[in-house]
Image (tube, grey):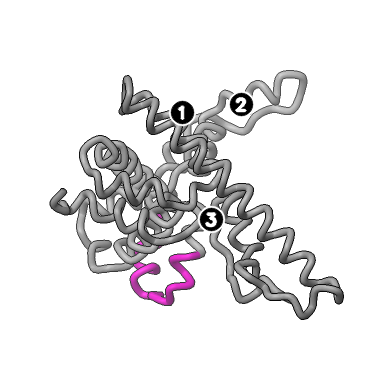
């Protein structure tokens, strides 16, 4: 099948050779989203309006700061801070009185609602989630239409546990009949085989700390710990710190 713009990130993730192609897609998408926010796009009115309203979660704000574009981030945060000040000015309810009903009053107050909104809103998370929904739909579209994709899929290393369950849960929304049965059959077999593979590699990693196995070859186990972390928690970690 001819590559289209919307299929490239999915194929790149599938061909990345990691323990979870969707984690690879998300890692690239997160990096691109950080770059997008810190590019001249932050001067565009619609982007500034969205970042003012949504803000950033703690993790992504830290990543933005660590990129070192102090001026760009400062301009954005100044605008965002002014917007939040205006939201505070719009609060109409007063302080919650102490007493028997104070907890219930706090849970239903405007200030509690605003706090919940701020704590659950992030421009980068929302941007990533929007793109990721398209990636998932494209993934199943390619499974149905592209034999080359099916070959890549069948020769993959499986998925992290979260994305494996995501595929099990969402497959019936995109596939049906024989196509669905084949997909689930291959997926389940592949995942079980690769989880056992990683478990065996991690076990050998631990055994290599025993003096009796010092002279034995590492095989594929040197980076078994970070790969297991990716498999279990969907998190990329520094492979250089795997050994002590």
Q: Position of residue 160 (x, y in %)?
A: 53, 47
Q: Nearer the viewer, residue 54 or 213?
A: 213
Q: Residue furthest right?
A: 211
Disc 3 + disc 1, Cβ < 8 Å: no
Can you identify the residue that label 2 sits on? Answer: 107
- Does residue 125 appear to the left or right of 42 in the view shown? right
Q: Earlier in the sequence, mark 3 or mark 1?
A: 3
Can you identify the residue that label 3 sits on? Answer: 58
Q: Which residues are magenta?
A: 63-81
- Who's the residue at 13% across and 52% down the image? 2
- Who's the residue at 77% across and 64% down the image? 206
Q: Nearer the viewer, residue 85 or 182?
A: 182
Label count reads 3
Q: Secondary structure at mark 3?
A: helix
Can you identify the residue that label 1 sits on? Answer: 169
Camera-nearest label, 1 or 2: 1
Q: Residues under labels 3 and 2: Cα distance?
A: 23 Å
Q: Residue furthest bottom?
A: 215
Quadrant housing the C terminus: bottom right
Q: Secondary structure at mark 1?
A: helix
Q: Earlier in the sequence, mark 1 or mark 2?
A: 2
Report the disc number at residue 2. Answer: none
- Who's the residue at 34% across and 59% down the image? 33
């Amino acid at each position: 099948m001819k590559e289209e713009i919307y299929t490239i990130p999915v194929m790149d993730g599938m061909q990345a050779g990691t323990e979870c192609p969707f984690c690879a897609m998300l890692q690239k998408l997160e990096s691109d989203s950080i770059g997008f926010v810190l590019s001249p796009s932050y001067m565009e009115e619609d982007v500034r309006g969205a970042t003012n309203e949504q803000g950033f979660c703690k993790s992504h704000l830290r990543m933005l700061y660590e990129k070192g574009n102090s001026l760009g981030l400062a301009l954005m945060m100044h605008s965002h801070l002014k917007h939040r000040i205006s939201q505070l000015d719009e609060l109409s309810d007063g302080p919650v009185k102490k007493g028997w009903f104070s907890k219930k009053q706090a849970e239903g107050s405007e200030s509690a609602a605003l706090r919940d909104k701020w704590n659950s809103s992030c421009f980068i998370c929302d941007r990533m989630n929007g793109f990721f929904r398209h990636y998932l739909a494209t993934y199943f579209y390619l499974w149905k239409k592209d034999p080359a994709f099916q070959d890549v899929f069948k020769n993959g290393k499986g998925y992290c546990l979260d994305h494996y369950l995501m595929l099990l849960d969402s497959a019936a929304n995109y596939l049906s009949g024989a196509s669905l049965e084949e997909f689930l059959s291959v997926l389940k077999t592949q995942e079980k085989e690769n989880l056992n593979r990683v478990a065996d590699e991690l076990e050998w990693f631990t055994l290599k700390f025993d003096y009796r196995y010092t002279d034995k070859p590492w095989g594929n186990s040197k980076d078994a710990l970070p790969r297991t972390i990716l498999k279990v928690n969907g998190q990329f970690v520094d492979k250089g710190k795997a050994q002590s």
